[in-house]
Image: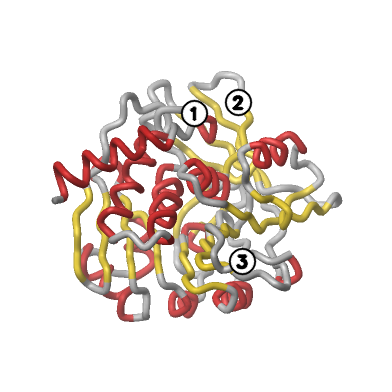
Amino acid sequence: MVVQNNSGVCVVGSFSLDSIVVSGHRPFHNLGGATTFSSFAVKTLGESAFVVSRVGGDFPEAYLWRLREAGIDVSAVKRYPQEFTTSFELCYNGDFSERSLKLICNGSPLCLEDIPHDLSAKVIHVAPIAGEINYEVMQHLRSCCNFLSFDPQGFLRHFDKHGNVSMCLQSMDRHVLSLVNICKVSLDELFVLTGQFELKTAVRELHDVGVETVLVTMGAKGSLLSVEGVFYNVPACKSSIVVDPTGAGDVFIGAFLVEYLRGKEPLWCASMGSAAASMVVEGLGSTFFGDREEILRRATFLYEKELK
């Protein structure tokens, strides 16, 4: 199997079996993980999406069917019947303004044998959620693409014996960053990753190790885009309603990469990211991604009215 160089976006990382609990009510089970949100965003915007992952015997076949029905290529998703899939519990209060995250099960890490031997893509986005990708795998993926995109959240998460999540740098090999062309990071993750607590200073540190494009997502405050040290503030697109912010950053980078692949200027790419993120928060979990026409309308308004 070959992913040709004129293909869309290849996303690498674990899926998650999410159990969503709202105000103590009965759990709602859903397909989650950065890989899910990014690949759906790519496909929603009309590009091909290809996923490299591994799942356990507990991973519902219905989820793979859903991905296939959406047009996402899951032929490189390997099932290991004797293993379990990474799973999280997400607990929200009644208005979704507060969330706690707990790891229920950590699946096995991806290894070199899980990567198609003839993988070749223009853009690969690496999106670990629980430390499932190491430097050796990252280095190999870098050799398989023209541009490597990276979300470090899964490298920075630390889990205590109860599955409670905190962030620290201890488990991450920072040499990984020297392989990366594009890095998408939340504000808190940026500060932990760099040890710097001034926004632009922290971003410059990522540039200093070789990252060309940095995207810092800041929720309702929008995002910061830096291209080789030139900074742009990108406002958040307004949503009709905010139901669940889960996955907004993953959708942002998925949409950004679609336009990046098409050769669009960075500010337009970020506008599309903001617009797509404003759509996914209008539904619960990975149940709603909006449509391309509405995302385009919101992105055009943001780009022409607020950025230009």
Which residue is located at x 47 percent, y 57 percent? Answer: 153
Residue 171 % position (x, y):
53, 69
Horizontally, is 95 left or right of 7 in the view? left
Q: Amino acid at mark 2?
A: Phe
Distance between the Cα atoms at labels 1 and 2? 10 Å
Mark 2 = which residue? 28
Which residue is located at x 46 percent, y 60 percent? Answer: 151
Distance between the Cα atoms at labels 3 and 2? 38 Å
Q: Picture quarter containing residue 274?
A: top left
Horizontally, is 265 left or right of 126 in the view? left
Label 3: element kind: loop
Which residue is located at x 45 percent, y 51 percent? Answer: 254
Mark 3 = which residue? 4
Camera-side residue: 205 or 164? 205
Q: Picture quarter containing residue 132?
A: bottom right
Q: Earlier in the sequence, mark 3 or mark 2?
A: 3
Q: Earlier in the sequence, mark 1 or mark 3?
A: 3
Task: Report crowding for label 2: few under 14, some 14 to 19, many 20 or more residues within 10 A (C-alpha).
Answer: some
- What color scheme is it? secondary structure
Q: Amino acid at mark 1?
A: Leu
Residue farthest right in this picture:
82
Q: Do the residues under discs 1 and 2 have CB atoms within 8 angstroms?
A: yes
Task: Report crowding for label 3: few under 14, some 14 to 19, many 20 or more residues within 10 A (C-alpha).
Answer: few
Rendered image: mark on residue 284: 1
Which of label 3 and label 2 is nearer to you?
A: 3
Residue 188 % position (x, y):
34, 55
Camera-side residue: 199 or 147? 147
